[in-house]
Amino acid sequence: MGSVFVILQRFLPEFLKGTAVTLELTAVGILLGFALGLTLALMRAYGSKPLRIIAIGFIELFRGTPLLVQLFLIYYGLPSLGLTLSQSVSAYLALGFNSAAYQAEYIRGAIQSIGESQMTAGRAIGLSRWQTIRFIIMPQALRLVIPAWSNEPISLLKTSAVVFLIAVQDLMARGKRAASITYNPIGSYLAIAVIYLVMVFAMSALLKWLERKTKIPGFEMETEAA
Amino acid sequence: MPNPILVVKDLTKKYGDNIIFHDINMTVNEGDTDVIIGPSGTGKSTLLRCINLLTKANSGQIWLDGEEITAPGYDEDEVRQHVGMVFQNFLLFNHLTALDNVKIGLSKVKKLKDDQAEAKAMQELDRVGLADRAHHYPGQLSGGQQQRVAIARALAMDPRIMLFDEPTSALDPELIGEVLEVMRKLALDGMTMLVVTHEMGFAREVSDRIIFLEKGSIVEEGPPEVLFYTPKFERTREFLWKITELYGKKESDS
Amino acid sequence: MDVGRFIQYIASGTAYTVSVTLIALPLGLFLGLIFSLLYVYGGKVLTRIMSIYSTVMRGIPPIVLLFILYFMVSGNINLSPFWAGSISLGIVSSAYQMEIIRGALLSVSGAQMMAARAIGMSRMRAIKHIIIPQAFRMAICPWSNEAAIVIKDSSLVYALGVPEILRRAQLISASTQQPFLAFIVAGLIYFMLVFVTNRLLDGLDKRMRIPANP
C-alpha cells in the first residue's frame, strides 16, 4: 500500500492530466450519446416501420457487441473505407454510439411508462401527434428517466478506460506508463484505481443530488415488480 | 382434570421503551379453543409470535406440554414443529404447489420418506377440502384456499397447539366462511387452538374462553356467554359492542 | 486470402472467448452467491465487509481491475494469461453477480423466512429450501444481462494477449489489410454469442416461472 502512495505522489501531475482526458471522454460520450439516444428512442417509439427497424438494429448491435470491437472498427476499420479519424475522435464516437444505445433504452422505458393515455389526452385538446410528444410526453419522460439514466455516466466513465488500447492518453494510459517506468504494475494500477473510485463516488453523489432536485413527489416510474 | 398444553407466565415484550405487552399470564388446556380479542395494536400478533419463539420475549416463561421452552438452550426449531402457526397473509411458499407446501416440512424437517410425506400431505389437504387443488401454485388459488393450504401445512406437523393470527382478516368477505368452517371443524375434532380474531360469531360459537387484551395487558377473560352478556368491565362491553357493529354486518352477509 | 479462410481464422478465436466466459461466469456466480449470502445473512460485520467489497469492486473500471488482479494472480502462481485473465474476469464479475443475487434474496420477503421457521425449519434449511429456490428464479433475468456483459468483457483479455476473437481479428486485419471486414466479422460473432446466450436464458426463465405468481 505504501508503494501506491509513492506512485500517486510521483505521477500525480501525469495522472491528473489523464483524469481530465477521462472526464472529457465521459462528458462528450454522454452528450453525444444523449442526443443520438433520444433520437433513437423517438424513432423506436413513434417512428414508421423502417425507422423503427433502423433504431432497433442500431441499439441491439451496439448493446450486443463489445465496446472494444466498436472502437477498433471505427479507428482501424473506417480508414479502409476512406474515412480516417484521429484517436480522440474515434474514442468520442465509439463511446457516444455505445452510450446512445443504452440511453435510448432508458428513455424508451420512460416513454412507455407514461403510456397511451397522455397521448390521447394531448390529442383530445387538439395538439398534433408531434406536439403531444414534444410538449406532453417528453417533458414527463425526461424527468422520469433520471433515476435509471443516472447509472449511465458512471458506467461510461468506467468503460471509457479501454480507449488506451488505441493510445488515447486517458488515466488508464498514464497508469500503464507508470507501470512500465516503475516496474510496479500492481501499485500503478491500484493508484489509478483509487482515482477512478474517487471520480465514481463524486459523480454518484452529484447524480443523487440531481435526482433529489428534479424529483416531483408522487411522480415516479413504477419500480419493476420484483 | 384439564390438561394444560400451553402455560404463559409473566410474559413481557418491549421494543426499546415501547411496551408491547407486559406480564401476560394464560393457560390453554388440551382440546380447548381460546380466542384473543382486542383493539389493533395491542400486541396480539406479537404475543402469538413470542409463543412460538419467532420473536423473543424480554422476560417471562412459557411451558409447552409441561416443558419450559423459554429455558436457555432449548431447541427453538423443535418447539416450532409442535406449535402450528397460521398467518394473516397466509405466507405460502410461492415456488411450491399446494401439495409441496404441505409436504416440505414433512420431508425436510421431519425427514419422512418421500411417499410417506406425500401421503400425509395429501391427507391434510383432504382434511381442509383441497385435495383437488394439490397441484396448483399459490398464485392460482383464491385467498380462502391459500389460507386453508396454510392450515394444512401447519397441521401436517402434528402440532400440540395451533396458533391463528387473524386468519381471515386479509380475506374478501365471501371467502371468510370457508376458512372459519375448517377452523370450526378442527375445534370440534379436539385440536387445541389459540386464535386471534375479530370474528365474533366464531368466538361466540366455537370458543371455550375469550381473552380480552387491551393496551398490552389482559383486561378480562372468561367463557363467551359471560364475556358477551355480563362482562365485568365497561371497556369490554364497549369493545364488543363496537366490534359487533363493525363486523356483524359482514358476518350476516357471508 | 479468401473470405472463407478469413472468417474461419477469426472464428477459431471463438473457442477462447467461450472458454474465458465459461470460466469467468461460473466462478463469478460461485463467489457472488457466497458473498451475497454473507451480505444478507452474515450479521453486521460481514454485511459491512461485503458492502465495501461490492462498492469498491464496482467502482473501478473492469479493465483496470483486470490488470490489477492479473498481475496479482500471475505474480503469485505461474499461470498462463488465459487462466489468469479468466480467473480475474471471474473475480470482477463476482461483485456484480453478488448484487444481482442479493437483490433477489431481499425480494423474497422476510415473511417467507418467518413462515419457514414457523414449521420448524432451521435458518440454514429455510435459506436452502425456501429462499434460494425463489431467489434463483428472480435472478435469471438480471443474470442473463450479466452473462452478456461477461461475454463482451471477455474481449478485454485481448489486452493480455489471449488469442480470442478480437486478437485474431486484429492479427488478420494487419496481415490482410482488411481491418473493416475483420472487425465486422468479430463483432458479428460476439453478437451471435450474446444473442444465443440471452435466448437460452430466456427459455430457462420461461420454463422456471411459477404459474400465476405475482
Image: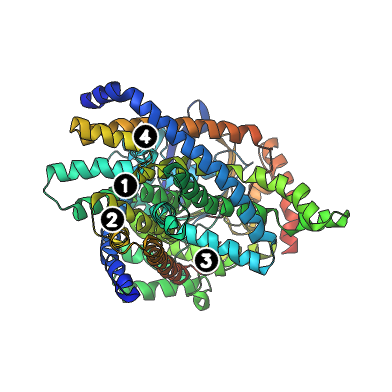
**Foreground mark, 1 or 3?**
1
Query: Residue furthest toward the front?
Result: A82
Dots 2 and 4 on the same chain: no
For disc 1, the chain is C
SS category of the residue bearing label 2: helix
Name the foreground residue: B176 vs C135: C135
Task: Kindly identify which residue carries mark 4.
Answer: A171
In the picture, the disc for residue A119 is none
State which mark lies toward you, 1 or 4: 4
> Marks 1 and 4, Cα distance to the nearest angstrom?
20 Å
Q: CA distance from mark 2 to mark 1?
A: 9 Å
Q: Which secondary structure lies at badge 4? A: helix
Q: Are marks 1 and 4 in contact (CB under 8 Å)?
A: no
Crowding at dot 3, Cα within 10 Å, few <14 / some 14-19 / many 20+, comes out as many
Residue A107, image x, y percentages: 61, 51
**Are discs 1 and 4 both within one chain?**
no
Neighbourhood count class around disc 1 (C-alpha, 10 Å): few under 14, some 14–19, many 20 upward: many
Query: Given the image, on which type of amino acid does mark 1 rest?
Result: Val
Question: Compared with residue B133, is residue B153 higher up or lower down, i.e. above or below?
Answer: above
Dots 3 and 2 on the same chain: no
Q: Amino acid at mark 4?
A: Leu
Residue C185 % position (x, y): 38, 66
Task: Name the residue that disc number 3 marks.
Answer: B138
Which residue does the numbered mark 1 point to in the structure image?
C92
Residue plotted at (48% across, 54% down): A83
Chain of the residue under the numbered disc 3 shown in the image = B
Image coords of residue B175 (percent x, y): 65, 65
Local SS, label 1: helix
Q: Who is closer to the viewer here, B148 or C176?
A: C176
Local packing at callout 2 (Cα closer than 10 Å; few below 14, some 14-19, many 20+) is: many
